[in-house]
């Protein structure tokens, strides 16, 4: 069994951050979203993994290569144009050969047992297997239609959905899927749709199985989904010991809190669950639950809660609490007035915000 992770797409709903970085590399609980998918496949016994990416392939390659993946072998495959999931599979045809493979969308976060998912595919000798979850607005997803507990049709982003059961970005196929994908034509969206390829399996009489998500699942394409995923993961984290290289003075640390190396924390309150990276400076600040503070961040005379703050950002002298925010790399948020108002930000990398009246 091989693995194929898709790390393309433009991330339009997370701009301006995704103008300068791949959406799959945005961290949740201080770990790139993409890494959760890699870890999920490795934990399921899949050690030969391909990652398909577009223009951001060099950034993705360098980020992934800097981490340790044990015995796993990771290959990077370029998709010249963002022409859909089925097209990405076609780009990886040489890597995959005729081997069965698990396809995983790299912007997914999933709490589901993939070992059982894979085992059932193998034991039932299926040609394809899909993972489904119930969604509030199925018009945004690929959706299945059931008859007597059997899937009879798949529709991509339907105006009139036949059900609320959506594909959640995890699939298993054998080599037959390649034969079907090669015959596909672009949809009205100009993409080669994986839903049409799966429909082709059905129409050719191949065996298609399905499972339902028995835990949580998050498509992290929007700010609110990123923040919710951050909360879910931090809720499951254990507290860590404070490293010897980190200095904490006149401060109170409560709840499940993980603190990195070489941090300096003075006159502050940290209330978990939260995670703080390395080389972080916190002075006279309150860092509240469900915050993820990346490496090299400076927080002084401010309050931050339920937010993600990326590398080397600086927040100083903000009188009102900053909540529900995603702050990009190297961003500065500074106050110049005694009368600041409540604020909520999604700020791109290398930006600067000075708050006036």
Image: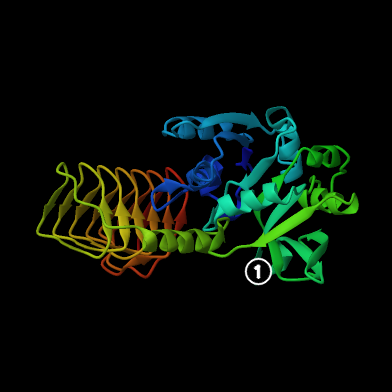
Which one is in front, 166 or 260? 166
Residue occupying image coordinates x 70% and y 55%: 130
Residue 202 versus residue 184: which sits nearer the camera?
202
The correct choice, above or below, for 284 with respect to 148 in the image is above
User: Residue 154: x percent and y percent?
Assistant: 81, 59
Res. 138 in view = yes
Q: Quadrant of the C terminus?
A: bottom left
Q: Quick check: 282 left or right of 191? A: left
- For this orientation, the residue located farthest to the left is 250
Element marked by disc 1? strand
Rendering coords of residue 59 (x, y %):
51, 33
Asked which quadrant contains residue 181, the reply is top right
Please provide percent x and percent y for residue 162. Answer: 80, 70
Which residue is drawn at the image coordinates 38% and 61% (left, top)?
A: 236
Q: Quadrant of the N terminus?
A: top right
Horizontal arrangement in the rendering, residue 32 relative to residue 163 (left or right): left
- Asked if 279 appears above or below 96 in the picture, the reply is below
Query: Please, which colouring scheme is shown?
Result: rainbow
Residue 188 at least partly seen: no
- Give how far across and how far down residue 193 sits, in percent: 78, 49
Q: How many marks?
A: 1
In the foreground, 113 or 257: 113
Residue at point 36%, 55% (across, down): 292
Neighbour class for label 1 at 10 Å: few (<14), some, many (≥20)?
Answer: some
> Which residue occupies the extreme front position in the image?
123
**Foreground: 164 or 25?**
164
Residue that carries the numbered disc 1 in the rendered image: 134
């Amino acid at each position: 069994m091989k693995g194929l992770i898709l790390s393309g797409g433009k991330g339009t709903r997370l701009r301006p951050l995704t103008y300068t970085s791949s959406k799959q590399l945005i961290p949740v609980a201080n770990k790139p979203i993409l890494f959760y998918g890699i870890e999920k496949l490795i934990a399921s016994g899949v050690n030969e993994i391909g990652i398909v990416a577009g223009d951001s392939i060099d950034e993705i390659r360098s980020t992934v290569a800097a981490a340790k993946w044990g015995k796993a072998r990771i290959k990077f495959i370029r998709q010249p144009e963002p022409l859909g999931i089925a097209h990405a599979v076609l780009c990886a045809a040489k890597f995959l050969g005729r081997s069965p493979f698990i396809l995983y969308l790299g912007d997914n976060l999933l709490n589901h047992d993939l070992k059982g998912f894979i085992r059932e595919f193998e034991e039932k000798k299926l040609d394809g297997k899909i993972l489904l979850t119930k969604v509030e607005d199925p018009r945004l997803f690929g959706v299945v239609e059931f008859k007597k507990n059997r899937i009879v049709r798949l529709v991509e982003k339907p105006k009139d959905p036949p059900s609320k059961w959506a594909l959640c970005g995890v699939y298993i196929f054998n080599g037959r899927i390649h034969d079907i994908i090669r015959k596909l034509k672009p949809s009205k969206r100009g993409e080669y749709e994986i839903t049409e390829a799966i429909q082709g399996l059905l129409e050719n009489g191949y065996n298609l199985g399905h499972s339902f998500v028995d835990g949580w699942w998050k498509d992290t394409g929007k700010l609110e989904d990123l923040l919710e995923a951050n909360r879910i993961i931090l809720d499951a984290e254990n507290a860590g010991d404070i490293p010897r290289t980190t200095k904490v003075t006149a401060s109170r640390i409560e709840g499940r809190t993980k603190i990195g190396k070489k941090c300096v924390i003075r006159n502050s309150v940290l209330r978990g669950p939260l995670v703080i990276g390395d080389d972080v400076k916190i002075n006279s600040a309150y860092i509240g639950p469900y915050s993820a503070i990346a490496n090299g961040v400076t927080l002084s005379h401010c309050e931050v809660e339920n937010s993600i703050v990326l590398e080397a950002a600086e927040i100083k002298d903000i009188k009102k609490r900053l909540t529900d925010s995603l702050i990009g790399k190297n961003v500065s948020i500074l106050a110049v007035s005694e009368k600041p108002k409540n604020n909520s930000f999604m700020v791109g990398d290398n930006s600067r915000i000075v708050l006036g009246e």
